[in-house]
Structure formats: structure tokens, C-alpha cells
Image: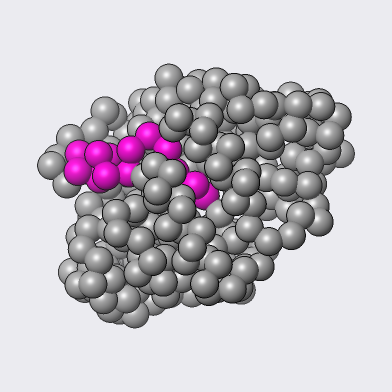
Amino acid sequence: MNDATAATKSAIGRYGVWTTLLRPDGPASAGERAEAAAELEELGFGALWLGGNSSAGHAAPLLAATGRITVGTSIQSVWEHPAPAAAADFAGLEATHPGRFLLGLGVSHGPRVAGYGRPYATMTGHLDALDREGVPAERRVLAALGPRMLELARDRATGAIPYLVTPEHTAEARGILGAGPLLAPELKAVLETDPGRARATARAALARYLELPNYTRNFLRLGFTEDDLDGGGSDRLIDAVFAWGDERAVRERVAVFHAAGADHVAVQLVEEDGAAGLPREGWRRLAAALLG
């Protein structure tokens, strides 16, 4: 492990928060987002991962509102952010908040990108361009699922940020990455002890991802069947990719990912449809469970 990757692992620690809700297009005002980011830092989380097609511009106000926590994109689409612009934005954040921004890159999904094709080659070309523009590999992480992209994360970035995966995938990813690179999977958590309600909440959140072939192919690669993908996801699939239950159950599920090889787990709190505003009480509950 090189010194830069070791420093990143130390800075972000074992636990982070993954969310789309702290973006400017989320449900809260700029002041509420800044206040929430500062509280998440105070609670002890090591990183905020901005979900969806995020950018350095989305990260900037959260970095300004905090003093220590790392902010990463999860992900910035290589299709929508040309390398020269991405490099300029990175340089701006590095100048004002040195060492606190991680450029999380991904190839997005065919149904969401016009002219989608050759994702591996596109990512490789984007990394080549970022090299030319001076964005260091140690400040990049890749949203890698399959073996080839994981190898690219090992060789051309500081590590991988897989999304919607299982502990088994984490173990496989660690085997491909080796001991040194960062491995920081996302894990969805539902703080609900009733199995029916918890799984219903999980299925509502999972539905959009079951329409995206990158994820469904990965599930099939991991041993799930087409039947597991039907009807919003089988109980087996839900229980594999969500942590649900009380705080202790969530903590124990996160620990399984760490035991499988994760350095850091980015926990995404999932609430019932219709929940309004920022889930700050839920984030506090997660902090008490994981960091208390």
C-alpha cells in the first residue's frame, strides 16, 4: 500500500454516509445541507459520498461547511464531465480544501446515457486524459463491479467504491484488488425491525436498480437467479444487499462487509417512501450504532 492510499484510508476511517439528499437538487435548503454535513462530521463519520450523477460542484459547499470530513462523488459520470473540466474542478477543490475531495468516477448505465458503448474503453480513455491534466491517481476511486473494472481501480486509482453489492462480492473484489487499494462498498440500511415493512421499504428502493443491466448482470454473476430479480427482488436478494432491523442488526451486517475485506463501508439510510427532508435522526441512530 502506498503512503497516499494509507492516508486516505486513515482519513475516511471505517464508516461513511452515502446519500443523494445533500446535493443542491435534494429536499433541503443550502443552510440545512451545510448544517447536516457539519453534524455528520461531528458524529464521527469519515466520509460523505454524494450519490447519483454528482460533481465537484456538489461537493464544494459541503467541504466549505466542514473542516475534516472527506467528500467524494459516487459517482461523477465520465460521459457528462469531460476530463479537462473535471480536472479544473478538482484543482479548485484541492486548492481550497487540500486532500479532502475524492473523485469517484463511474460509467453510469446504458439506459441513462445517449450513445452509451464500450464502457471499459471509455473509462480507460477518461483516466488517460485525467493523467494528462494532472489529476493524481491517488485522489480517484472507481465504481467497479466486474473484474476488469476492479483491475482498473487497482492499477489506475486508489481503489474501488462498488455499489449495490454483497459481502461475497466484497471478498471477490478484495482478491482482485489485493491488500493495498481502498475498498469502500456502499450498503443500504433500513432501520425497521418488522420484516414485512423492512423488506417493502427495501424493494421500493431497489426497484429502479433492477432496470439497469450493470446491476442485474452482477447479481447473476454472484449466483442469484432471474427469479431473484422478479417482483422487486426475492427475500434472498433483499437480505443480501440491505441491512435491516435495529441498530445492532445494522452494525452486525456492516461488520460482515468489513470481515469480507472492506476498508470502509458507505452506509445509505433508506426510509419509507414519502419521508420528507433530511433523515437526520436516522443518521444519528446510525452513528450511535456504528461509532458509539
Q: Position of residue 144 (x, y in %)?
A: 45, 46
Q: Position of residue 131 (x, y in %)?
A: 21, 65
What is the basis of the colouring in this image?
Answer: one colour
Question: Quick check: 66 above or below 210?
Answer: below
Q: Nearer the viewer, residue 257 or 97?
A: 97
Q: Quadrant of residue 250?
A: top right
Label tally: 0
Q: Position of residue 62 (x, y in %)?
A: 42, 65
Q: Position of residue 55 (x, y in %)?
A: 44, 69
Q: Quadrant of residue 104?
A: bottom left
Q: State which quarter of the image contains the N terminus.
A: top left
One can see residue 96 in this view: yes
Q: Is residue 78 magenta?
A: no
Q: Nearer the viewer, residue 259 or 42?
A: 42
One can see residue 143 in this view: no
Q: Is residue 10 magenta?
A: yes
Q: Residue at x 42, y 38 (%)?
A: 15
Q: Residue at x 35, y 69 (%)?
A: 64
Q: Residue furthest toward the left?
A: 3
Q: State which quarter of the image contains the C terminus.
A: top left
Q: Residue at x 81, y 26 (%)?
A: 195
Question: Quick check: 141 above or below 222?
Answer: below
Question: Quick check: 163 above or below 244?
Answer: below
Q: Residue at x 27, y 40 (%)?
A: 9
Q: Quadrant of residue 103?
A: bottom left
- State left or right for residue 15 relative to residue 8: right
Query: Magenta span covers which residues?
Result: 6-18
- State left or right for residue 158 relative to residue 43: left
